[in-house]
Amino acid sequence: MGHRPYSKFDSIPTGHASERLTEGCLVLEGGAFRGLYTQGIVDTLMLLDINFSCVVGVSAGALTGMGYVSGQVGRAARINIGYRHDSRYIGWRAFLNSRSMLDVGFLLEDRGILEPFDWERFNRPEQRFLAVATNCRTGAATFFEKGSCSDINQAVRASASMPYTTPMVMVDGEPYLDGACSNRIPYDWALEQGYDKIVVIRTRDLSYRKADKDVKLAEVMYRGYPELVDNLATAGERYNFQCDEIERLHGEGRIFRIAPSEPVAISNMEGDVERLGDLYWLGVYDCFENLDALRAYLDA
């Protein structure tokens, strides 16, 4: 049985961002298909001519950040919604190609995609882009920066490789998985880099807190990687600390945070394209709702 296309697909905006940069760092949380929320926000920012000079993203946040730096309005949303039920992206053909039911390479390598990625725009040196991945051997977060790392495409693939469901990705001879295993919301990196303006885009509502999970499966699957297992065991505690710190820093005016204005109830592999589309438009709505406060923060 076929799948119905998204009813509002043609309403997703198109165009290209200007090349004028806004000084500051945009920090993008991951969250698999919750990234549609972030895509609604970054598309709106591009249309409003707010293009941050630095972008750091984790997992789905790294994939969304690539589209933001390439300046391609709406591309990420159209691909994630339009190709959701294409088995080259998610399904049996994805597994045959990548040994994973979700083939991130399908998004990054333009295999059959109608909107090729603008690598020339993405690679211009004026705008920084970093993807966070977790070194499975050391458990540490690694920040791969375009123009500095050997293969940013491979680094983003590593950043978006979810534990348990996707294989490790080798980058420069080291095994990596999802950056969320070590640093889900890398606002701390932006602070350490000395950015005066830091904007954090969450993919969970402000009340959400994460419980630690049983890691018996991790102990079996990753028995040769004890540091990674330790990270997975304490993931909830560390994430909750980050959430609390972001709120404290937002209250002090040191960073600016945008989060979903209602709980996000989609699954990591959500198949209902109407729900994915609704999440995208929630991001658009929340961006406009926060726009005056965001501009005041940037101008202060």
Image (cartoon, rainbow, N blue to C red):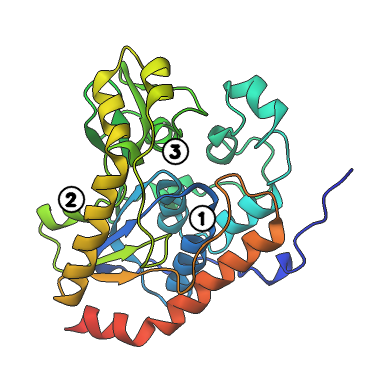
Question: Residue 8, image x and y in percent?
Answer: 73, 69
Residue flagged by tag 1: what amino acid is it? Arg
Nearer the camera: disc 3 or disc 1: 1
Report whether residue 298 is seen.
Answer: yes
Residue drawn at x 31%, y 15% as measured from the top left: 173
Looking at the image, residue 13 sits to the left or right of residue 60; the answer is right
Q: Tell me the SS state at disc 3.
A: loop
Q: Residues within 10 Å of mark 1 (few under 14, many from 20)?
A: many
Instruction: First in sequence, mark 1 or 2: give its number.
Output: 1
Residue drawn at x 43%, y 59% as measured from the top left: 203
Q: Which mark is residue 34?
A: 1
In whole angstroms, how far apart are the C-alphas of marks 3 and 1? 13 Å
In whole angstroms, how far apart are the C-alphas of marks 2 and 3? 19 Å
Question: Residue 33, image x and y in percent?
Answer: 55, 51
In whole angstroms, how far apart are the C-alphas of marks 1 and 2? 22 Å
* Above or below, comparing residue 281 to residue 136 in the picture: below
Residue drawn at x 21%, y 83% as measured from the top left: 299
Residue flagged by tag 3: what amino acid is it? Ala
Instruction: Residue under label 2, please give it.
Output: 189
Instruction: First in sequence, mark 3 or 1: give its number.
Output: 1
Looking at the image, residue 51 sits to the left or right of residue 190; the answer is right
